[in-house]
Amino acid sequence: MLALVAVGVLFALLPKTASDASPEAGLPGSSEAAQVDALLDDFPSADSTAGLLLWTREDGGTLTDGDRAAVQARAAELAELSPVPQAVRPRFSADGAAALVAVPLDAAAADDVDALAAELRGTASDDLPDRLDARLTGPVGFQADIRNAFAGADLRLLLVTVSVVAVLLLLTYRSPILWLVPLLVVGAADGLARFVVTALAEAFAIPVDASISGILSVLVFGAGTNYALLLVARYREELRSTERRDDAMVRAVSAAGPAILASGGTVALSLLTLLFAELAGNRALGIACAVGIVLAMAFALLVLPAALVVCGRGVFWPFVPSPHGRPPRDSVWGRVGTAVARRPATVAAVSLVGVGVLALGLGGYRVGLSQTDQLLGAPESVTAQEALAEAFPDAGTAGAVLLAPTDGVDDAVALAEATPGVQSATPGESSDGRTRIDAALDGEPQSEEAFAAVTALRDRFAAESGDVAQTLVGGSDATALDARESAQRDLLLVAPMILAIVFLVLLLLLRSLVAPILLLITVLATFFASLGASVWLFQHLLGFPALDTSVTLFAFLFLVALGVDYNIFLTSRAKEERAGHGTRDGMIRALGATGAVITSAGVLLAAVFAVLGVLPVVALTQIGVIVCIGVLLDTLVVRTVLVPALVFLTGDRFWWPGRRDGARAAHGETTSDPQLSAAR
């Protein structure tokens, strides 16, 4: 009751404003592109943007005289929307198959980019001849399509996630009642997490966008349901030996609580390492998701136990656990553990070879997608950009904005035009002692050719002396390049911190030096195998040229932090069973007792992350697929056979320097068939 009142009060008091629709780069101030953007704010054209309209015939044929006349008429109407109407003039391609109109626009009008894009499309498409098609691309077109990709993202992800969790809980528990309890508790945790994150975002100007909100829900539902599965399984196990359900819950929380706290603490602390990242979006994700994990833990350990005790044993109907009921059936996972114990070296070797084969896919690992590769499907801005690049090679290329000292602008232009990868450099307006130079680059926007040209320009100017050496290179392509480099630096900084946190948590939980090292190796093996498999899947089977800039860091974070959860669940139970049954039989009993619940939790978490694929955003789809593959690999292979095999091979040394098993260790462990039951 107290939990319901507290949650209700927080829901009522915390702000409910929506997050930003689309993500921003969030570059650090030291980035050259960020410096250019800041300086451009003082230029007369700072408040301008542009929309590019492209007309082609649906059959790909040459424009007729009527088509050209219609384009001229549409251009005249589009000019009325521009603060520079004289600049709105149609261009026709050399082969006569396409017409292009660039419409300079006031950036203030782009605050409502959806309305602006709709107005541009409506004006360009009005009263056209049959089979003549108008499409919008350029800054306004891409921004509108990105916003549309995220439009309703929170609701879509939430509905699909809840549906997936509900179905899997129903299949796991085989009860028409029980699945509702953890679903409602975790749902309340997710709703509260959204409100808390919104309040923090407003108070501290944290850039929380729709992609972060989507990942937050997926993480809270995935991790929160995992914690719920573990607690419910242990509670049901205790109900089979305890008359009073409150006593059974106390014992369940006492037994499962440390594992849940260690698991959730690992994830939360790992997420907080993103506070050291350069990219503002990474820092925002870390704060938001850490809040979500803490709330998921709190609800699993405080609200869920109270709800289950209040509901009584009948919540498990029709499989109501009772001390007087029939003992549960033998566990298949106990038999698996026994089989692994017979040939641990062979099992470990085969598992490692399989993981190694999957990791071979890293041979094709590439990072960085062009602008047209970042959205799934065929949004209008992407198809128009591709057609524009073919029809107008000079207009469909990447570009850079150079800010040179006005006294050295001629030298800067000459140097830029002599740089490989630069097609042309045109000086423009000036402000505060600097002149803007617009450079056309080889390749499409945000491509490797564009990045190479930006790097070459920066290197050429840095090697000069005098005023020209102060020239800065920015623009959208430079921003994308700096974001990629910042993401790589974030990965190199954050990854070791995450590994250190995981190691320390395992060290404190298991009181062992050997166990954390071996478990960390298995988690890293899972990460590299899943990344390699995903590289092969995306680049060779699905035709993606590379992984998105942010994917590797987020995949590492989620796979290492979440992947170690199942090792924590298993080894903490093995440590508990070891006290009475020794290392070997203790691991077999632990696998038998936790196998079913860990498998259910892993399948559920993998399915929940796969839900990210419902959005037409390549980065989220790639993150979801990589984590899905990794969690399944960790759940079904690493935790099931590899970790037990390593324990059987190392024996008591696995727990070193913890004390040995007393009499059992002194006399050698006996072979036994545990005939254990899984937590169902």
Image: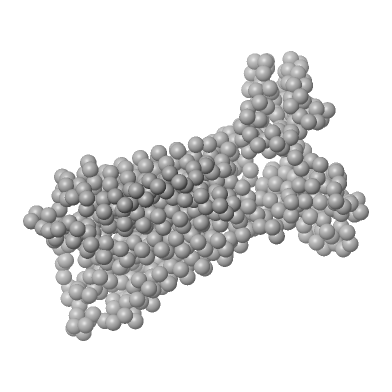
Kindly identify the residue that appears in the image at 70 percent across and 48 percent down.
Answer: 477
In this view, the residue in front, 251 or 211, is: 251
Q: How is the image coloured?
A: one colour
Kindly identify the residue that appears in the image at 53 percent across and 36 percent down.
Answer: 151
Is residue 641 shown above or below 150?
below
Is residue 641 shown above or below 373?
below
Q: Quadrant of residue 103?
A: top right
Residue 364 falls left or right of residue 384: left
In this view, the residue in front, 184 or 267, is: 184
Is residue 571 shown above or below 220?
below
Q: Quadrant of residue 472?
A: bottom right
Residue farthest to the bottom, as pictured: 666
Kindly identify the residue that appears in the image at 17 percent across and 76 percent down.
Answer: 670
Residue 649 falls left or right of residue 289: left
In this view, the residue in front, 654 or 85, is: 85
User: Where does the image place residue 466, in percent across and percent down from the top left?
Assistant: 89, 62
User: Where does the image place residue 669, in percent across and percent down from the top left?
Assistant: 20, 77
Instruction: Tell me, yes or no, if residue 130 can be seen here.
Output: yes
Kindly identify the residue that appears in the image at 63 percent across and 34 percent down.
Answer: 112
Residue 368 falls left or right of residue 223: right
Instruction: Tell me, yes or no, if residue 619 can be seen here.
Output: no
Is residue 497 shown above or below 396?
below
User: Where does the image place residue 537, in percent across and percent down from the top left?
Assistant: 48, 48
Residue 177 falls left or right of residue 268: left
In this view, the residue in front, 557 or 5, is: 5
Q: How many marks?
A: 0
User: Where does the image place residue 602, in percent across and percent down from the top left?
Assistant: 34, 54
